[in-house]
Amino acid sequence: NAGVTQTPKFQVLKTGQSMTLQCAQDMNHNSMYWYRQDPGMGLRLIYYSASEGTTDKGEVPNGYNVSRLNKREFSLRLESAAPSQTSVYFCASTPGLWETQYFGPGTRLLVL
Amino acid sequence: AQTVTQSQPEMSVQEAETVTLSCTYDTSESDYYLFWYKQPPSRQMILVIRQEAYKQQNATENRFSVNFQKAAKSFSLKISDSQLGDAAMYFCAYRSGGGKLIFGQGTELSVKP
């Protein structure tokens, strides 16, 4: 049981490049989330998926898209990376909306 | 909109002593959950303790306990018998039925041997 896994662990992009951050969970959880963490700040919600087939915007969705590929996987895509998207990205999952969220190890993204 | 505020950017405690981290929140909802997460240098987010708003009894997990004051919208974390491994960033978080977590800015705790 690996819990929540994220790939890659670290990535460097040039401004304007695109990439997809991958997240998978093996706990049969219904809901999944993407957060970003900037220095001196707590985590902020980018997008979430309450259940398979649904996605909704969070607090800071601009510049991102998501796909809930199936119940296990929830990907985050940057179409045209900007330096302001330099951050640590966390994926999380939970069995239901009232349950505890379990976090992946994070992906550190540097946009030059 | 809900907000979470941690007014102590940094705290320090002597090993084996007790420390309290503060958190206040603002909401108009009656049903919600509150959490404390620990983030060590590895960056992994680890759940420390959670509190359901409808429960009057304060949650306890081993050396960690909370002081939940619903009317005052206060949710502090007390760490007893502090250990070197407790050194980390601690985040207070709020969640309503929509499932979204709202985090405070964090408190960096250092433990002195």
Image (cartoon, coloured by chain):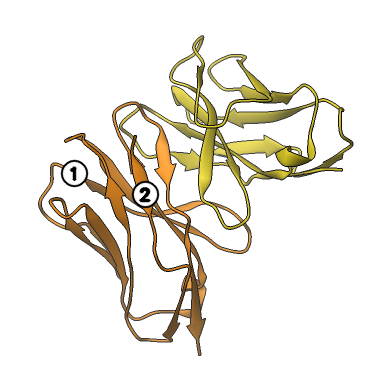
Chain colours: A yellow, B orange
- Residue B59 falls in which quadrant of the image? bottom left
Question: Does the rendering let one see residue B62?
Answer: no
Residue B89 in percent (x, y) is at 51, 63
> From the viewer's perspective, is A56 left or right of B71?
right
The C terminus of chain A sits in image quarter? top right
B43 or A73: nearer the viewer: B43
Front: mark 1 or 2: 2
| Local crowd size for mark 1, using a 10 Å CA cut-off: few (<14), some (14–19), many (≥20) | some
Q: Which residue is labeled 2 in the image?
A: B4
* Chain letter of disc 1 in the image: B
Specify the amino acid type for callout 2: Val
- Considering the numbered disc 1 on the image, is that residue within a helix, a strand or a loop? loop
Q: Earlier in the sequence, mark 1 or mark 2?
A: 2
> From the viewer's perspective, is A29 left or right of B18?
right
| Local crowd size for mark 2, using a 10 Å CA cut-off: few (<14), some (14–19), many (≥20) | many
Pointers 1 and 2 within a single chain = yes
* Badge number at residue B53: 1
Residue B7 in percent (x, y) is at 39, 64
